[in-house]
Amino acid sequence: MADPILNSGDTAWMLISTALVMLMTIPGVALFYGGLTKKVNVLNTMFLSLIAFSITSIIWVFYGYQFAFGETIMGIIGNPANVLFSGITVNSLATLAPTIPTTVYIAFQMTFAAITIALISGAVVERMKFSSWLIFVIAWVSLVYVPIAHWVWGGGWLFDLGALDFAGGTVVHLNSGIAALVLAILLGRRKDTKLLPHQLGYSVIGAALLWFGWFGFNAGSALAANGLAGSAFIVTNTAAAAGLISWVIVDYLKTGKPTLLGAISGAIAGLVAITPAAGFVTVQAAIIIGLVTSVISYMAISWLKPRLGYDDALDVFGIHGLSGLWGAIATGLFAAPFINSLGTGVFYGNPEQLVIQLIAVGSVGVYSLITTLIIGLIIKYTIGLRVETKEEIEGLDTNLHEESGYRI
């Protein structure tokens, strides 16, 4: 076998993809979430994403990448041979992407870790202590995200089992959705649980940036500028469009009034669901995945959430958790070997793949739930998770940061 050779085209595409995924977190998630909250909490909400990105960036280069993608130790965690970037030079090529520099691969994977923790913030807005969020970010990225990324992508036991997750249906979305649900339950319900977006325009801009950045998220996960990246690009857009249309239809059938908030929620649900499948499925399958996922997420938000009584403020579990779950299962159904030889699903003669996908979502979901619960309980019974009632009622922007998004 010939020695790996740096490919300038692949490297350029991965640098662009990395920047696109960074754009998804700040300003994408920050604006999307910020517009949905009350105006007295808009800055705090945006700050949660900004600080999560920054903390994760430091963790990732110090030890996160090394534990996630180092040579596997019993399929559980990576060998941290390059802690503090030791042994990594400007000319090193990535083991899992041998046509691009290791530094570029590290940066690309870092943006995935950062957006995963930032997504969780949507469940806890308007009531979580900022100091508690900082501790949670450090603990959760280190103890939850890093091991799961190794299991699925870094050569761990789910990787060896043959679990398919092209760009993060389990690692990013199911993982963050389960963690968001646990943290929301530990925090308890807000004093005012109505969702009345104070500036829906922010959220539309945020959703558009997420949609745009998602091309780097999914097509970039091909790790090369090639036909697979092109296929992932088109199915990503197709599923997002189908998800938006599906949500608008359900909105209209249920209430008679399609909403803009519903439309952007459907687009995000479609993007989430296609994420694990993007490098494995056809355009036709992408349409089905997008149409179905909005129905699942809509029912979770309108029916499941009120009946169970949890206050997942911005529906991270309903959209990211359940759409990620559906996307992972759908990958096991629709993966087409003529798209990617690494994946063959039920409809192409391999029912075993569905079983593997179910094992993956089950193990990731259980690990995320238990570990997040332990982290959350430790924080709750030491420094506390929740702000004082007075601070919550008056708003977190002025009370926690002495700032205001508006002159009020």
Image: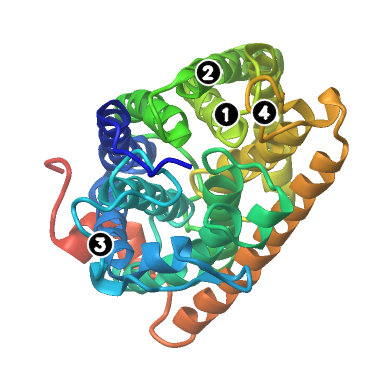
Position of residue 384 measured from the top left corner of the image (x, y, whole percent): 42, 80
Residue occupying the point 57% across, 78% down: 374
Q: Nearer the viewer, mark 3 or mark 1?
A: 3
Q: Residue at x 45, y 65 (%)?
A: 70
Q: Residues within 10 Å of mark 3 (few under 14, many from 20)?
A: some
Mark 4 Cα-neighbour bin, 10 Å: few <14, some 14–19, many ≥20: many
Q: Nearer the viewer, residue 396 or 4?
A: 4
SS category of the residue bearing label 3? loop
In which quarter of the view is residue 142 placed? bottom left
Q: Which dot, 2 or 4, sits closer to the camera?
A: 2
How many angstroms separate mark 2 from mark 1 (CA)? 7 Å
Q: Which residue is mark 2?
A: 231
**What residue sits right under mark 3 in the picture?**
88
Q: Of label 2 and label 4, which has the lower sequence position?
A: 2
Task: Tell me if residue 135 comes above or below residue 107 in the rendering.
Answer: below
Label 1: which residue? 279
The answer to which of marks 2 and 1 sits earlier in the sequence is 2
In the rendered image, residue 6, in percent from the top left (x then y), is placed at 29, 38
